[in-house]
Every structure is written in C-alpha cells, then in structure tokens.
Image (cartoon, rainbow, N blue to C red):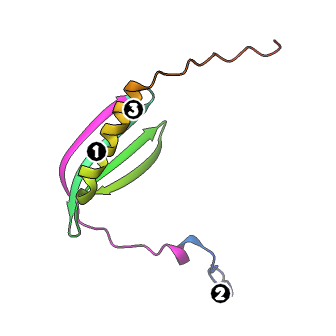
C-alpha cells in the first residue's frame, strides 16, 4: 500500500472482523446424495452448546444452516409434517421444455 492510501471504510473487513477459531468437537457426521445434491449433516459441540450443521453442496457451491440442539425436536416435527404432506399431495406433472422454433 502506498503511504498516503488508507483502507476503505466500506471494505468487508470493516464489517466482518476476523474471529478466532472456535474449538468444535465432532459428535457424528453423515452424508447423503439426493439427485445432484450432496447433504452433509454434522452434529457438533462447542463451548456454547450442541448444534446440527446441514451443508448442501451443489457443483462446488455450498450453503449451510445451523440448528441449535435445543431446536432439533421442533425441527424434526416440522420435517415429519413436510414429509407427510409431500406423500399425501399428488405431484404435478411437468411438461418437458419445447424445442426452440416450435
């Protein structure tokens, strides 16, 4: 950096200061492949408590959600309801896309 340059106050570092790594203990981890997506469910524990990390990997792009262990029962109930609804509701038939020029 040139001596008269200053870091921008709008840089990401200004809003997201680096945090020291948190020690996390791995309790259990499972991986499942569904169509093109890979899901990794990891149960971990750190000084703040236990949590489930669900990571979705699609072609190298990852998205993650974290659910505190205290909410896992409620999450399971809701997921069970979604599974039941998915089985009870008939799937809509989708038409394949028409070729161009038709």
User: Residue at label 2?
Assistant: 3
Vertical placement of residue 40 versus 72, above or below: above
Alpha-carbon neighbours of circle 1 within 10 Å: few (<14), some, or many (≥20)? Answer: few
Residue 41 lies, in percent from the top left, at: 29, 44
Magenta stretch: includes residue 71: no
Residue furthest toward the bottom? 4
Q: Mark 3 vs mark 2: give the one in front.
A: 3
Q: Residue at x 54, y 78 (%)?
A: 14
The residue at the point 38 percent across, 37 percent down is 82
Q: Which residue is mark 1?
A: 77
Q: Residue furthest left?
A: 27
Task: Please state if 46 lies on the left or on the right of 61 as rendered.
Answer: left
Query: Quadrant location of the C terminus?
Result: top right
Label ID, residue 85? 3
Which residue is most to the right? 101
Labels 3 and 1 touching (C-beta < 8 A)? no
Magenta span has 18? yes
Q: Nearer the viewer, residue 73 or 28?
A: 73
Element under disc 1:
helix
* Element under disc 3: helix
Q: In this rendering, would 3 be left or right of 59? A: right
Does residue 19 appear to the left or right of 72 in the view shown?
A: right
Q: Earlier in the sequence, mark 1 or mark 2?
A: 2
Bounds of the magenta segment: 13-33
Q: Please identify, in this view, whether the residue under mark 1 or under mark 2 is nearer the observer.
A: 1
Q: Is residue 24 left or right of residue 86?
A: left
Query: At x 43% / y 33%, what residue is drawn?
Result: 37
């Amino acid at each position: 950096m040139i001596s008269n340059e200053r870091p921008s106050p709008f840089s990401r570092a200004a809003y997201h200061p680096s945090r020291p790594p948190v020690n996390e203990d791995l309790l259990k981890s499972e991986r499942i492949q569904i169509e093109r997506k890979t899901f990794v469910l990891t149960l971990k524990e750190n000084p703040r408590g236990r949590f489930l990390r669900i990571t979705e990997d699609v072609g190298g792009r990852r998205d993650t959600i974290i659910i505190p262990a205290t909410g896992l029962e409620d999450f399971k109930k809701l997921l069970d309801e979604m599974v039941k609804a998915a089985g009870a509701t008939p799937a809509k038939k989708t038409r394949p896309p028409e070729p161009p020029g038709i």
